[in-house]
Amino acid sequence: MFDRDAEWAALARFAADERPGATLGVVSGRRRQGKTFLLDALCKESGGFFFEATEAADPESLMRIGAELGQYTGAAFPPRPADWHEVVDGLLRLGEERPVTVVIDEFPYLAKASPSLPSVIQAAFGPRRDERLRSRTRLLLCGSAMSFMGRLLSGTAPLRGRAGLEMVVRTLDYRQAAEFWGVRDPRLAALLYAVVGGTPAYRDGAAGGRAPGSEAEFGQWVIEHVLDRFSPLFREARYLLAEEPDIRDNALYHSVLAAVAEGNATRGGIAGYLERKSTDISHHLSVLEDAGLLVRDVDAFRPGRSVYRMREPLIVFHHAVMRPEWSRLERQGRAEQVWQDSQRRFLGSVMGPRFEQICRDWAQDYAPSDLFASPVAHVGHGVVNDPERRTSHEIDIVVSGNDAAGRRILLGLGEAKWQEPLGLGHLERLKRVRELLIAAGHPGAESAKLLCFGAAEPSAQLRSLAAEGEVTVIGLDELYAPRA
C-alpha cells in the first residue's frame, strides 16, 4: 500500500466501531486509484464480506450475491434472495454478534439494473428500525462512476443523511507520483506526470512497472506505452469518459474536452470552438465537472469570470496529442513519427499548463511555512486589467490567505514557465500587476510575494535579485525537494 495511510485509518475506524447500530459508508474515486485494493484488504483483515458487482441483469446479481453470502456464512444451501430487501436484511444479520465489514464494490452497476436499490438501503437503515439497531454491520458502497457516486448522498437522494463515512480516493499528487514511479530526476518526473498523472495502476498495469530511466528515454517510453495502438493506455482516455453513466453523446463530450485542450478555457470560448451557443453546452460542462474530468477555476480577481481545465493529465495528453492524429496512430508503425510531429503541441498544450498546475500545487501544499505572511488558503489564477497600457495581465499563480477577520488577502503572485528562461521582463510584469492591485486597494497587495517558477535556469540578473529578496525563484529542484 502506498500513501493511503489516512484512508486506511479512516476505514479501519469505521469497520472496528463497536457501537450498536448498523452504519453506512460511501467510497468513491476514479478507476485504478486503489479503492478495491483498500476495501478488499479491509475485509480480509477484519474477516468481512466483499462482493464485487458486475454489469448484469437484476436476477443474476441477486443469485450471485446470495451464493457468495451462503459461502461466507457456511450455509448448507446458498440462499436465493427474492429481492434486494432480503439481501440488505441478510447483510444486517451478519453483524448481530460483532462488527462486520461488508463491501459492495461497483455499486453503480447494481443501481443501474435496480434503480430502487438506494431507497431499499435507506429503508433498511431507518434510524429506529429494529434490524438496524440490533446489527453492527459496517456497510461500504463503492463505485468509480463519479457523477453517480457524487449524487448518492446529495440533495434529495434517498441516502442523504444516512452515511457515517464519505471518502473520495484521489489520485497521487505530482510529488507522490514521482516517488511511486521511483523517478528521482525532477524534470523527468514532471514530464511523466504530464502524461500519466498520479493514477497508481498505470505503472504496473500499463507500463510493466517501469518508468523511463532518463529524460533521453522518455520519448521512446511514450511511444511504446501510450502511443502504441496495442498499449493498454492507448484507449484509456476514451474508457474514462465512456464509463460515466451520465455521458451518452460521447462525441460531443470529447469535442468539449478537445476545445479545452486547444486553450479555449472559458464557456464562451468552448462554445465558439464548437460553433454552438453557450447555453447549448451548459449541461455537458456540468456533467464533466460532476465526473471529475473538468474543474472550473474562478478568477481570483474577477469572481464572475471562470475558466475550465482538465483534471486528468492522460485525458489532456489524449486530446492534445493523440486525438488529432488518431487515424495515423491506428496504422502500424506511425507512433514514432506522430510523437516527433507533436512536440510543439505537447510542450504548449500539455507540458506548459501541467507545469503551471504543479506550481500551484507546490504553493498550496509544499511551500515553506515562512514564505508567506499567513497560511495559504487558496491558490488559483487571475487576470488583471491594465487600462493605462490598454492590456491585461494573466497571472499563473495567485496565492491567497485570510486575515484575522476572515477577509481574503493576497499573499503572492507568480509566473510559471516550462521552456522559457525567466528573466527581468517576467519580474517587471509581476511588479506592474502588484502596483495595479495596490492602486485598486486589493487587500494584501502591498506585501504580496513575487514568485518566479521555471524549469529552465533563470537569468543571472534574476538570481541576483532573488538573493536580495526582491523575488523568490523556484526551480524543479525546489518543487520536488522533500518536505523538511
Image (cartoon, helix red, strand yellow):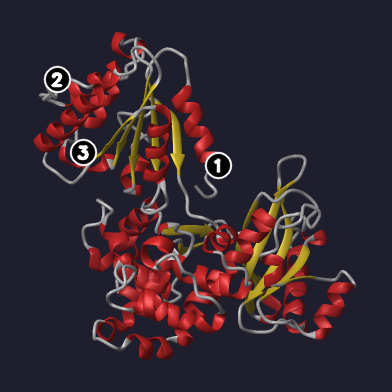
Q: Which of the 4 image quarters holds residue 284?
A: bottom left
Element class at badge 3: helix
Provide residue 39's location: percent of width, then percent of height: 39, 38
Q: Is residue 394 visible?
A: no
Task: Specify few, some or many for label 1: CA neighbours under 10 Å numbering under 14, 14-19, or 20 or more.
Answer: few
* Horizontal relation, residue 185 to residue 93: left or right: right
Task: Specify few, some or many for label 3: CA neighbours under 10 Å numbering under 14, 14-19, or 20 or more.
Answer: many
Which amino acid, mark 3?
Answer: Leu
State the residue at coordinates (47%, 27%): 14
- If you read the primary sequence from the N terminus, does the residue marked by circle 2 or circle 1 appear first? 1
- If you read the primary sequence from the N terminus, does the residue marked by circle 2 or circle 3 appear first? 2
**Gap in angstroms between the C-alphas marked 2 and 1:** 39 Å
**Compared to 124, does 224 lie above or below?**
below
For the residue pair 323 and 97, the one nearer the viewer reads as 97
State the residue at coordinates (28%, 81%): 326
Instruction: Look at discs 2 and 3 and give the one toward the viewer.
Output: 2
- If you read the primary sequence from the N terminus, does the residue marked by circle 3 or circle 1 appear first? 1
Q: Is residue 241 visible?
A: yes
Q: Which residue in the protein does label 3 denote?
A: 110
Provide residue 38's location: percent of width, then percent of height: 42, 41
Which amino acid, mark 1?
Answer: Asp
Task: Specify few, some or many for label 2: CA neighbours under 10 Å numbering under 14, 14-19, or 20 or more.
Answer: few
Residue 5 disc label: 1
Element class at badge 1: helix
Q: Quadrant of the C terminus?
A: bottom right
**Compared to 164, does 259 lie above or below?**
below
Element class at badge 2: loop
Q: Which residue in the protein does label 2 denote?
A: 76
**Gap in angstroms between the C-alphas marked 2 and 3:** 26 Å
